[in-house]
């Protein structure tokens, strides 16, 4: 790496694909890292659900050797690393060509902190591997959410030193002054950051949208960027696609005869998605399977309202039940706890059996089969087989509401369409994703007044709706020097 010569932004990962964005900002006195997640898709990541890391018992080593995790000496816990980072990487440098230019961050004795925008695994998946004295800053809500996710077993616990912050909190790390700002995304507690240095100001949005329940948060973020004269805005641009291409992957491969409801080509706003979910469940005559992301607690609350109105209960994987009960207890989710049940037959992989010490009520597939208009069941890879055992058929309903697989570009979509086709179950897509639409991006960028905009977290960042003169597209591992008058690449 280049000698330090003024603040620089280092683009580590997650530029030309959705997920796994990792940035560093380093100055004379400090190093900060924005997000420590892992890319998920097969196109973007060497390790993913299809090629899992850790087959030889060293997932962190796999993530580091593949450069999916930033090469930061001292960032990771020694027991997960097994050997010094240099010993792991140095013998590979002149052989594994792609590692040759990966940025390496040695211990400089400077202030170092991690900032996590939100708790989707593509932004926070490395938290379990961070060392115990590593300061990590996130929102108060994310901090609470992390506790609930850990206690339910949905994520591995972290021993890093987490601090939760309210909206607007300022944090100093060496000579960098940061402001943490609430944003709107499809998981609670999302935040963006403004980092001020002596040579310029950088804003990083994390994932965001204007079509959520709190668009005013994005207006406030943009206003603060403007007030602080942000020089460089790093924003997600997930929905950018080439002209004429389908903007969102829903619906591909679902046979028309299997579809009893409209698949909307246009994503809904969150309010309408919650209404649509409520309407579909309260009108459904039979059993409902529901494919969702368990961290989408706004949608879960809408589900809760539909459960009350239709006198149904939701049956989920035991860990999801544990997480929701924790979220209810922590004030993050509004569902009556008696409405949340777990599958009695553990449809989970070996080793993931329910923790019976948790106060969860279980229900059997035989009960669900016999009383099918009393339940809404979670559809996940672990519960596909349950659809056979309860006899899902044409009088029932499958609702896809932004769960995995997320769409036709994601692994598992073909399997899902095959199940829908063979079972002949009506299939309803309710899509209100968490990402800025092109119009929203245009509006936000204009309101920030940022002269330089770097779109990331996108399969096609070059098509982001950002004024051409303002857009800069760094390559992976490029360092960009902050300069009061212009940006200079020092790759
Ligand atoms: Zn993301
Ligand atoms: Zn996200």
Image (cartoon, rainbow, N blue to C red):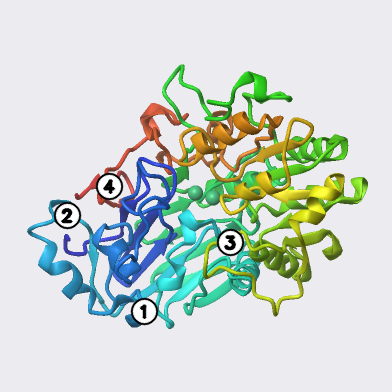
Q: Is residue 42 left or right of residue 337?
A: left
Confirm or deny contact between disc 4 and disc 2 (CB under 8 A): no
Circle number at residue 348:
3
**Label 1, label 4: how far apart the Cα atoms are:** 25 Å
User: How far apart, in angstroms, are the residues tagged by discs 4 and 3?
Assistant: 37 Å
Q: Nearer the viewer, residue 333 or 162?
A: 333
Q: On residue 476, which mark appears? A: 4
- Image quadrant in which you'd find residue 467: top left
Q: Secondary structure at mark 1?
A: loop
Q: Secondary structure at mark 3?
A: loop
Q: Quadrant of the N terminus?
A: bottom left
Residue 53 position within the rendered picture, expressed as x and y whole percent measured from the top left? 35, 61
Q: Residue at x 47, y 52 (%)?
A: 204
Mark 3 Cα shell of 10 Å, populated few (<14), some (14-19), many (≥20): some
Position in image of residue 428 (x %, y %): 70, 32
Nearest the camera: 372 or 443?
A: 372
Marks 1 and 3, how far apart at CA: 29 Å
Query: Tag on residue 395?
Result: none
**Residue 170 seen:** yes
* Residue at the (45%, 41%) spot, across then down: 411
Dot 4 surroundings within 10 Å: few (below 14), some, or many (20 or more)?
A: some
**Image coordinates for residue 298, horizontal then vertical, percent:** 73, 51
| SS of the residue under disc 4 | loop
Looking at the image, which residue sits at the far left?
A: 94
Left or right: 181 as drawn, with respect to 132: right
Q: Earlier in the sequence, mark 1 or mark 3?
A: 1
Q: Pointer 1: what residue? A: 77
Q: Which residue is mark 2?
A: 101
């Amino acid at each position: 790496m280049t000698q330090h010569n003024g603040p620089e932004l280092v683009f580590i990962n997650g530029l030309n694909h959705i997920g796994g964005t990792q940035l560093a900002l380093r100055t004379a006195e400090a190093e900060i890292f924005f997000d420590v997640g892992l890319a998920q898709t097969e196109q973007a990541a060497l390790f993913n659900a299809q090629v899992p890391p850790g087959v030889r018992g060293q997932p962190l080593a796999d993530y580091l050797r593949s450069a999916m995790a930033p090469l930061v000496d001292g960032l990771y816990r020694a027991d997960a690393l097994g050997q010094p980072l240099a010993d792991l990487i140095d013998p590979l440098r002149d052989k594994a060509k792609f590692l040759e230019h990966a940025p390496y961050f040695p211990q400089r004795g400077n202030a170092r902190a991690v900032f996590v925008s939100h708790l989707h695994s593509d932004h926070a998946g490395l938290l379990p591997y961070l060392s115990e004295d590593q300061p990590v800053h996130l929102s108060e809500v994310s901090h609470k959410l992390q506790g609930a996710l850990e206690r339910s077993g949905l994520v591995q616990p972290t021993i890093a030193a987490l601090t939760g912050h309210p909206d607007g909190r300022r944090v100093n790390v060496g000579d960098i002054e940061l402001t943490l700002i609430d944003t709107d995304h499809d998981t609670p507690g999302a935040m963006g950051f403004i980092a001020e240095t002596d040579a310029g100001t950088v804003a990083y949005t994390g994932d965001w949208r204007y079509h959520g329940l709190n668009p005013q948060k994005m207006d406030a973020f943009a206003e603060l960027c403007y007030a602080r004269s942000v020089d460089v805005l790093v924003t997600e641009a997930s929905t950018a696609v080439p002209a004429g291409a389908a903007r969102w992957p829903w619906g591909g491969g679902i046979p028309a005869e299997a579809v009893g409801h409209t698949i909307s080509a246009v994503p809904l706003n969150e309010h309408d998605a919650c209404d649509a979910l409520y309407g579909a469940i309260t009108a459904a005559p039979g059993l409902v399977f529901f494919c969702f992301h368990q961290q989408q607690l706004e949608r879960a609350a809408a589900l809760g309202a539909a459960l009350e109105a239709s006198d149904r209960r939701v049956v989920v994987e035991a860990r999801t039940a544990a997480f929701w009960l924790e979220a209810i207890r922590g004030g993050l989710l509004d569902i009556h706890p008696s409405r949340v049940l777990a599958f009695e037959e553990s449809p989970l992989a070996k080793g993931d059996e329910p923790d019976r010490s948790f106060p969860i009520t279980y229900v059997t597939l035989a009960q669900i089969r016999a009383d099918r208009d009393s339940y809404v069941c979670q559809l996940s890879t672990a519960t596909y087989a349950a659809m056979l055992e309860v006899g899902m058929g044409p009088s029932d309903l499958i609702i896809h509401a932004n769960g995995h697989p997320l769409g036709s570009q994601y692994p598992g979509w073909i399997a899902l369409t095959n199940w829908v086709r063979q079972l002949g179950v009506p299939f309803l897509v309710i899509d209100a994703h968490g990402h800025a639409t092109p119009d929203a991006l245009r509006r936000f960028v204009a309101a920030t007044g940022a002269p330089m905009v770097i779109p990331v977290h996108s399969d096609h960042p070059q098509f982001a709706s950002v004024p051409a003169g303002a857009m800069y597209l760094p390559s992976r591992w490029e360092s960009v020097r902050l300069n009061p008058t212009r940006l200079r690449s020092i790759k």
